[in-house]
């Protein structure tokens, strides 16, 4: 089986300080505001990339690096917000396709040399079944996050299986996002595995 081009993981200890369940979401507010601005910029980049792919079959490389950097930043913010790690993510946006390895939350996506001109018209439709699966698994994630909240609050440690569930769901969601944002022609599939 060939690995999906979108790869993400979290290399952080399961042990997290008890106060992080409340502290991390509060400390993440400035990061979330920055992420909001970045997400608007990615929408503009995706619109421009749509036209570039239509005429050239290529996603402009510098724009692709920016979009990959924003997705990496989103993953780092998410892992911090959900108290899955202790180190505070920096405000630095790393515009590379390969993860630089400077953070416990890793994300990489290789630059595609060629993208389908025809798929840009229907990717939004093709990704709907995957988004439905993400939504259903997301309901389970709410339960897992509530249990994880109390587990960390009382024991100072994430239950390993539950954290793997959240990471797997994020993996599937980011693959669907990369597909719908025209960054890959590889269908996200329905697996939460690496």
Image: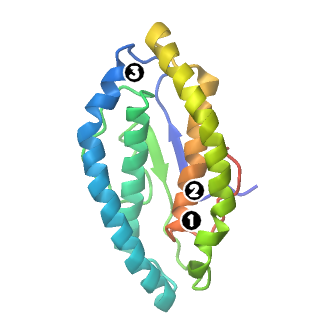
Q: Position of residue 177 (x, y in %)?
A: 52, 59
Q: Position of residue 11 (x, y in %)?
A: 49, 33
- Please report whichever mark, 2 or 3, sits nearer to the chain's N-terminal start: 3
Is 29 positioned to the left or the right of 52 in the image?
left
Any mark on residue 179, and which?
1
Q: Could you tell me if residue 1 is visible in this image?
A: yes
Residue 7 x/y as whole percent: 55, 51
SS label for mark 1: helix
**Dots 1, 2 in contact, CB < 8 A:** yes
Residue 165: horizontal and vertical position, in percent?
62, 34
Front residue of 154 and 178: 154
Q: Nearer the viewer, mark 2 or mark 3?
A: 3
- Secondary element under disc 2, as helix, strand or loop, is helix
Quadrant of the image for the C terminus?
A: top right
Give the residue drawn at x 52%, y 14%.
151
Q: Report, in whole angstroms, how far the alpha carbon at label 1 lies from the one at label 2.
A: 6 Å
Residue drawn at point x = 49 percent, y = 83 percent: 53
**Is the residue marked by circle 1 packed among few (<14), some (14-19), or many (20+) residues within 10 Å?**
many
| Residue 92 seen in the current view | no
Residue pointed to by mark 3: 21
Disc 2 crowd rating (10 Å Cα; few below 14, some 14-19, many 20+) is many
For the residue pair 108 and 177, the one nearer the viewer reads as: 177
Q: Are marks 2 and 3 in contact (CB under 8 Å)?
A: no
Q: Please, which residue is most extreme toward the top here?
A: 154
Q: CA distance from mark 3 to mark 1?
A: 32 Å
Given contact means CB atoms under 8 Å apart, are the residues at marks 3 and 1 in contact? no
Quarter residue 23 falls in:
top left
Label 2 and label 3: CA atoms lie apart by 27 Å
For disc 2, the marked residue is: 175
């Amino acid at each position: 089986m060939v690995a999906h081009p979108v790869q993400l993981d979290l290399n952080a200890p399961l042990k997290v300080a008890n106060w992080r369940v409340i502290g991390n979401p509060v400390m993440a507010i400035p990061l979330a505001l920055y992420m909001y601005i970045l997400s608007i910029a990615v929408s503009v980049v995706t619109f421009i990339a749509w036209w570039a792919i239509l005429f050239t079959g290529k996603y402009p490389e510098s724009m692709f690096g920016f979009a990959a950097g924003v997705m990496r930043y989103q993953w780092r913010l998410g892992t911090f917000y959900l108290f899955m790690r202790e180190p505070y993510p920096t405000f630095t946006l790393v515009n590379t396709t390969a993860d630089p390895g400077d953070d416990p939350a890793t994300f990489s996506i290789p630059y595609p040399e060629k993208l389908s001109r025809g798929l840009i018209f229907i990717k939004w439709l093709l990704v709907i079944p995957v988004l439905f699966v993400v939504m259903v698994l997301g309901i389970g994630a709410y339960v897992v996050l509530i249990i994880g909240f109390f587990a960390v609050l009382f024991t100072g440690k994430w239950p390993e299986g539950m954290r793997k569930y959240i990471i797997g769901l994020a993996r599937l969601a980011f693959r669907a996002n990369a597909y719908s944002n025209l960054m890959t022609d590889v269908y996200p599939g329905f697996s939460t595995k690496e």
